[in-house]
């Protein structure tokens, strides 16, 4: 009977049981609730790699006159005795155009009937440009070019210094 007669500061035991049960249920609900669903997202970046091509390690060649067997002692021919070498570094496949040699300077111009020939080698390719430009495909990466030239005149060269140039153009 004493449980029905409580003093001021006392609460019925049934209320304490209710509070304990509620706390346990709440803790249980929190402990057993499913974890938040994991989510992910791909964050994308955009970049542009520009086409780059460089010519480097250009080593000029040397050309000298030679005598054709049919011309006696006259020098009708100037040709490479050492090749010009050029390294090409490109990050894409390109089209390379090679010109025949052209006279840059010299004591006399090339007369009509002069034959101009450029010889180009790289990898397993051997290309000859005579009378017109020649176009070849160049792979990406570093390619070492070897260039030789030959100029054959119908008349002998006169004494002096002759400078010839070959133009190489690479387009992506």
Image (tube, rainbow, N blue to C red):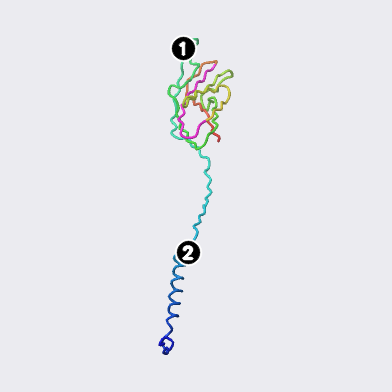
Quadrant in which residue 61 is drawn? top left
Kindly identify which numbered label has been placed on residue 33.
2
User: Which tag, 1 or 2, sits closer to the chain's start?
Assistant: 2
Kindly identify which numbered label has been placed on residue 73.
1
- Determine the residue positioned at 54% across, 33% down: 94
Residue 123 locus on image (x, y percent): 46, 26
Residue 13 locus on image (x, y percent): 42, 81
Q: Which residues are magenta?
A: 138-153
Between 75 and 21, the one lying in front of the other is 21
Residue 139, magenta (yes or no): yes
Q: Is residue 102 above or below residue 70?
A: below
Q: Quadrant of the C terminus?
A: top right
* Label 1, label 2: how far apart the Cα atoms are: 105 Å
Between 125 and 115, the one lying in front of the other is 125
Between 160 and 139, the one lying in front of the other is 139
Kindly identify which numbered label has been placed on residue 84.
none
**Secondary structure of residue under mark 2:** loop
Residue 38, magenta (yes or no): no
- Determine the residue positioned at 55% across, 31% down: 95
Badge 2, how many Cα within 10 Å: few under 14, some, many 20+?
A: few
């Amino acid at each position: 009977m004493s449980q029905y007669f409580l003093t001021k500061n006392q609460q019925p035991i049934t209320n304490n049981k209710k509070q304990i049960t509620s706390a346990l249920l709440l803790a249980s609900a929190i402990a057993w609730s499913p974890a938040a669903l994991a989510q992910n997202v791909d964050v994308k970046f955009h970049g542009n790699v520009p086409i780059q091509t460089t010519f480097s390690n250009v080593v000029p060649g040397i050309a000298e006159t030679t005598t054709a067997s049919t011309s006696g002692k006259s020098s009708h021919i100037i040709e490479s005795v050492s090749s010009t070498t050029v390294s090409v570094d490109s990050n894409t496949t390109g089209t390379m155009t090679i010109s025949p040699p052209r006279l840059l300077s010299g004591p006399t111009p090339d007369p009509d009937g002069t034959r101009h020939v450029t010889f180009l080698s790289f990898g397993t390719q051997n290309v000859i440009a005579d009378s017109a430009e020649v176009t070849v495909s160049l792979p990406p990466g570093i390619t070492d070019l070897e260039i030789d030239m030959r100029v054959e005149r119908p008349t002998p060269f006169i004494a002096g210094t002759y400078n010839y140039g070959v133009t190489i153009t690479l387009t992506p």
